[in-house]
Image: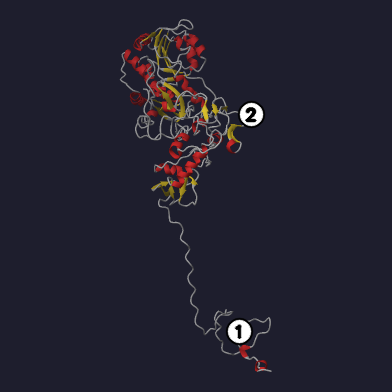
């Protein structure tokens, strides 16, 4: 047996039994030893050992984002320019403030966000990929780039995709000249198509309703029209049907687009897909000029642009006014432009019409004024006065002042168009634009306002033998009132349009329509609104206020007015409600002023007749 076999282990060198803990044990009463390096202490050191170091202070919480540079607002940088906007402002609107133009098709500031055209993708410092500018709100400290090669390639690719199946209809398309596909192709794409094979064919003339026709091949499925019908008039009459390249806009089965606001879809369509059946193929957009005006279809007073060429008005379009009509107008109001062009009284006439279809001899307006003044002077103090709420404030101020001072009138009968039905949004039952103004002016001049029915009763009873009419619109059948007017001995009428009533006038004076002179209306809520002259008066017509001034001077009175502005500033002082109205400051922007920025109204945020690089040349007159 060797020494290794006979030697007994002692002390610390004893091997622990199998399954026992492996830590080192100390004999009772022995001096503790330091544990080997790396060993773990199960108990704290003895009381006589060195004191433990105090624990380190807790780590400081990470600092939050820096406070905003402009409290209450969001500050960011777009194309190297700093911009400060309200929280929630999207990138498109913020970029406009610093002059950066982000292209878009589906976005509209008054509709919900769809972000389906992908034309507005831009680079943002806090996003790894391009983001849609219409859908993405501005963040504090964000850096946005809209002109990088990556963004430009995205725009080019989107244009190529949209134009794959789009027909080349530009030469016959009504949208030509105000089409975003045309503008954006020249600006962001300008490359030939790489499509192999034919384009997808769809319905070229899909009649959606009485006023709108759809060319499905031109549609880019931006969904603006669908969102508008769902969200603004709340009449969901349109939908998107199909899939992929065969996706189309259409009406629901068994229905049609017959809303009174259907033509707004034509306004907001960024391409030539939705077209007005009334305006289609009638005029090129680049031949039209636009004058800021006010709709005369009802008492709402929607702000409009009157698009004209020469001395003809071709259409009305909504002009933005947050307090009245926002960016919309009804189809009824759009159709009322037609009376500006047809059936006009363009020459003065003395004498009643003899028989149906017989023409009355026309005379110079100066001669007719003399005849009217002589006839009215003979019946001074016995003349009834009929005023139409279609006339402007300036027309009524001058004409009713003439009636009071020169004719001795003490009351005024209110004519105007017949009442209609109101709808749930903008259209009112009163089809006259200035009833409120007529009532305010009559009150300011001390004239008693009487209903039209009393005038008819007075004529039938023989109490009214003479009548001076400022406008011949009547709220009853024109034929029935013409029969009553035939009983009058003196009937001096200032009229815009021919009718059975004007045929009974002993002296007929041609009056200008509202687009042929400057003026104001008072709409149903009491707002005074300016409208601008589009073109000179047709024929020998003159504004009601100018005719009243000529009659005043012919009867020996004084009338030094030479413009609508003069009339309002001089005679409007008698109407307390007009005192705070500033004629000049309330003027809407005119097309002839350089450097203007028209309010967004049309499909791409500018009215037809304006290009993005400035005001157009004034064509015609």
Residue drawn at (62%, 88%) of the image: 13
- Which residue matches tag 2? 254
N-terminal-most mark, 1 or 2 = 1
Residue 148 in picture, x, y percent from top left: 43, 47
- Foreground residue, 89 or 296? 89
- Which residue matches tag 1? 24
Is 110 drawn above or below residue 389 in the view shown? below
Crowd rating for badge 1 (residues with CA inside 10 Å; few <14, some 14–19, many 20+): few
- Foreground residue, 601 or 457? 601
Furthest toward the top, the residue is 354
Q: Quadrant of the C terminus?
A: top left
Residue 360 in picture, x, y percent from top left: 42, 7
Determine which of the numbered discs, if any, sits on residue 342 in the image. Answer: none
Q: Quadrant of the N terminus?
A: bottom right
Place residue 347 in its image quadrant.
top left
Place residue 617 in its image quadrant.
top left
Is 39 drawn above or below residue 439 in the view shown? below
Q: Secondary structure at mark 1?
A: loop
Q: CA distance from mark 1 to mark 2?
A: 94 Å
Colouring method of the image? secondary structure
Q: Can you see residue 121?
A: yes
Residue 166 in picture, x, y percent from top left: 52, 34
Q: Secondary structure at mark 2?
A: loop
- Foreground residue, 261 or 128? 128
């Amino acid at each position: 047996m060797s020494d290794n076999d006979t030697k007994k282990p002692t002390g610390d060198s004893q091997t622990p039994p199998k399954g026992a803990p492996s830590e080192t044990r100390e004999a009772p009463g022995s001096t503790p030893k330091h544990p080997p390096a790396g060993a773990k202490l199960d108990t704290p050191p003895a009381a006589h050992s060195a004191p433990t170091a105090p624990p380190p202070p807790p780590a400081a919480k990470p600092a939050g984002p820096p406070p905003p540079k402009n409290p209450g607002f969001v500050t960011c940088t777009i194309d190297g320019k700093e911009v400060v906007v309200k929280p929630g402002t999207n990138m498109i609107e913020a970029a406009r403030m610093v002059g950066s133009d982000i292209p878009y098709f589906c976005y509209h500031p008054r509709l919900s966000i769809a972000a389906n055209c992908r034309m507005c993708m831009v680079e943002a410092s806090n996003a790894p990929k391009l983001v849609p500018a219409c859908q993405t709100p501005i963040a504090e400290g964000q850096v946005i780039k809209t002109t990088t090669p990556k963004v430009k390639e995205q725009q080019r690719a989107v244009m190529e995709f949209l134009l794959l199946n789009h027909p080349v209809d530009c030469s016959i398309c009504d949208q030509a000249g105000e089409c975003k596909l045309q503008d954006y192709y020249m600006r962001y794409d300008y490359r030939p198509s790489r499509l192999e094979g034919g384009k997808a064919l769809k319905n070229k003339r899909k009649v959606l309703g009485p006023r709108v026709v759809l060319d499905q091949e031109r549609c880019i499925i931006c969904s603006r029209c669908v969102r508008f019908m769902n969200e603004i008039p709340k009449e969901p009459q349109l939908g998107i049907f199909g899939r992929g390249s065969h996706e189309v806009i259409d009406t629901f089965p068994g229905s049609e687009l017959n809303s009174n606001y259907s033509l707004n879809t034509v306004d907001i369509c960024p391409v030539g897909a939705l077209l007005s059946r009334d305006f289609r193929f009638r005029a090129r957009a680049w031949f039209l000029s636009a004058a800021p005006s006010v709709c005369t279809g009802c008492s709402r007073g929607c702000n409009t642009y009157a698009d004209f060429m020469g001395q003809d008005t071709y259409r009305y379009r909504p002009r933005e006014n947050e307090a009245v009509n926002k960016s919309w107008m009804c189809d009824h109001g759009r159709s009322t432009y037609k009376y500006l062009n047809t059936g006009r009284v363009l020459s003065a006439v003395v004498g009643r019409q003899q028989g149906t279809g017989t023409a009355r001899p026309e005379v110079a307006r100066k001669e007719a004024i003399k005849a009217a003044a002589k006839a009215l002077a003979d019946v001074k103090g016995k003349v009834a006065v009929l005023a139409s709420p279609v006339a402007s404030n300036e027309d009524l101020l001058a004409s009713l002042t003439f009636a009071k001072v020169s004719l001795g009138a003490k009351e005024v009968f209110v004519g105007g168009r017949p009442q209609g039905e109101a709808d749930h949004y903008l259209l009112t039952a009163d089809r006259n634009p200035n009833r409120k103004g007529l009532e305010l002016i009559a009150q300011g001049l001390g004239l008693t306002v009487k209903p039209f029915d009393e005038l008819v009763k007075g004529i039938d009873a023989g109490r009214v033998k003479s009548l001076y009419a400022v406008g011949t619109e009547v709220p009853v059948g024109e034929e029935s009132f013409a029969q009553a007017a035939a009983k009058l001995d003196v009937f001096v009428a200032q009229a815009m349009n021919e009718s059975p009533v004007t045929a009974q006038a002993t002296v007929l004076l041609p009056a200008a329509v509202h687009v042929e002179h400057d003026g104001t209306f008072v709409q149903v809520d009491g707002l005074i609104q300016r409208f601008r002259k589009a073109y000179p008066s047709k024929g020998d017509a003159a504004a009601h206020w100018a005719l009243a001034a000529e009659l005043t001077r012919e009867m020996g009175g004084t009338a030094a007015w030479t413009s609508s502005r003069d009339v309002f500033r001089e005679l409007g002082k008698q109407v307390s409600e007009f005192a705070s109205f500033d004629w000049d400051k309330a003027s809407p922007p005119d097309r002839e002023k350089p450097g203007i920025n028209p309010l967004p109204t049309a499909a791409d945020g500018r009215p037809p007749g304006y290009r993005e690089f400035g005001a157009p040349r004034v064509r015609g007159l």
